Image: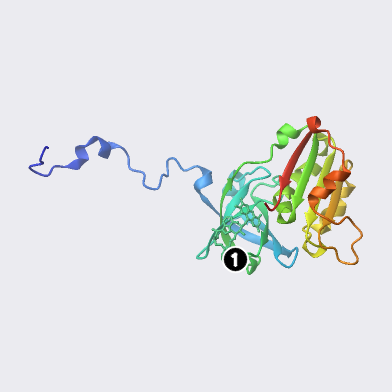
């Protein structure tokens, strides 16, 4: 065993000669950065879900922020925490994000109390995305249950905005009851797009409901799918 007889200047050691970058600023990609965003408007969708429109505050950062349908962001409420939330809107307007948030616990309850002008941190986007490029030229089957329509809405918007890219677009959506249907104000708009078909089913119908009753999977019995020519995206509770 060697014993150091006297201290020496460690700065001469090889490991000390490498530039120190504690904050990993050199390797930080935009994914690791927090974008400051402002809530520009909030609408109530159901008793427990609200739709938030956010805008990244800095114009240069807004230009840098891009995502693909299916991805999610981490939303930070300063002092309360950070939650993963799927992006529910279109990616055609850079730096503008729509989030459909269910009031679930600590952070989401704080978000539900926030109105226009409130600021949050956004990290991301994260996660894999729907392979919409691969789906071009094929039939598209979009299946959502409950809050699953939030991430799927970005694919629905993409498919309706780029209608010519796909063959038939079929949307199947299931919810517990009509009061919990998300984005119901958009259904007619989606249905009006040529070649887009939307079917809705509920498990606990109110007396005034005349549509199908059951789980979203029951809707599959009424449709014909050509598996070799169809891509399906499924989002919902386990
Ligand atoms: C990839 C992904 C996408 C999601 N997209 C949406 C969406 O679009 N809309 C929506 O309303 N909800 C979404 N959720 C669920 C949402 O993240 C949770 O409801 C939220 O984290 C609850 O946080 P809270 O502080 O309000 O609740 P609390 O129960 O008080 O949670 C405490 C902490 O636990 C963690 N946590 C709790 N639940 C979850 C969860 N399901 N997933 C991950 N971390 C959790 C969070 O860090 C949270 O701060 C998504 C979850 C994931 C993983």
Distance from mark 1 CB to nearest ligand 1 atom below 8 Å: yes
Residue 199 location (% of width, % of height):
86, 50
Residue 202 location (% of width, % of height):
82, 58
Nearer-the-camera pick, 164 or 223: 223
User: Left or right of 70: which side holds 183?
Assistant: right
Residue 57 location (% of width, % of height):
59, 55
**Image quadrant of ligand 1?**
bottom right
Name the quadrant containing residue 21. Answer: top left
Total numbered badges shown on the rendered structure: 1
Which residue is rendered at x = 70% and y = 63% of the image? 50
Residue 122 location (% of width, % of height):
57, 54
Which residue is rendered at x = 77% and y = 46% of the image? 143
Which residue is rendered at x = 33% and y = 43% of the image? 20
From this viewpoint, is residue 137 visible? no
Binning the other alpha carbons within 10 Å of mark 1 as few (below 14), some (14 to 19) or many (20 upward) gives few
From this viewpoint, is residue 47 visible? yes
Which residue is rendered at x = 77% and y = 62% of the image? 180
Q: Residue furthest bottom?
A: 113
Q: Which residue is mark 1?
A: 105
Q: Residue furthest left?
A: 5
Describe the element under mark 1 as helix, strand or loop: loop
Q: Please tell me whether residue 178 is drawn above or below residue 149 in the rendered image.
A: below
């Amino acid at each position: 065993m060697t014993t150091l007889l006297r201290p020496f200047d460690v700065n001469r050691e090889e490991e000390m000669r490498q530039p120190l970058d504690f904050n990993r600023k050199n390797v930080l990609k935009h994914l690791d950065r927090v974008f400051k965003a402002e809530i520009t408007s909030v609408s109530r969708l159901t008793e427990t879900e609200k739709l938030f429109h956010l805008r990244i505050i800095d114009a240069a950062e807004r230009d840098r922020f891009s995502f693909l349908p299916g991805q999610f962001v981490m939303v930070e409420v300063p002092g309360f925490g950070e939650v993963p939330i799927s992006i529910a809107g279109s990616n055609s307007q850079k730096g503008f994000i729509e989030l459909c948030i269910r009031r679930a616990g600590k952070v989401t309850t704080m978000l539900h109390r926030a109105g226009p002008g409130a600021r949050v941190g956004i990290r991301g986007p994260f996660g894999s995305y729907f392979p919409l490029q691969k789906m071009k030229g094929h039939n598209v089957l979009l299946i959502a249950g409950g809050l699953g329509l939030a991430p799927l809405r970005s694919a629905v918007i993409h498919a309706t905005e780029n209608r010519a890219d796909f063959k038939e677009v079929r949307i199947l959506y299931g919810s517990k009851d009509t009061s919990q249907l998300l984005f119901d104000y958009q259904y007619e708009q989606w249905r009006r797009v040529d070649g887009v078909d939307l079917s809705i089913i509920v498990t606990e119908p109110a007396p005034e409901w005349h549509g199908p009753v059951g789980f979203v999977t029951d809707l599959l019995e009424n449709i014909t799918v050509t598996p070799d020519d169809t891509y399906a995206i499924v989002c919902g509770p386990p």
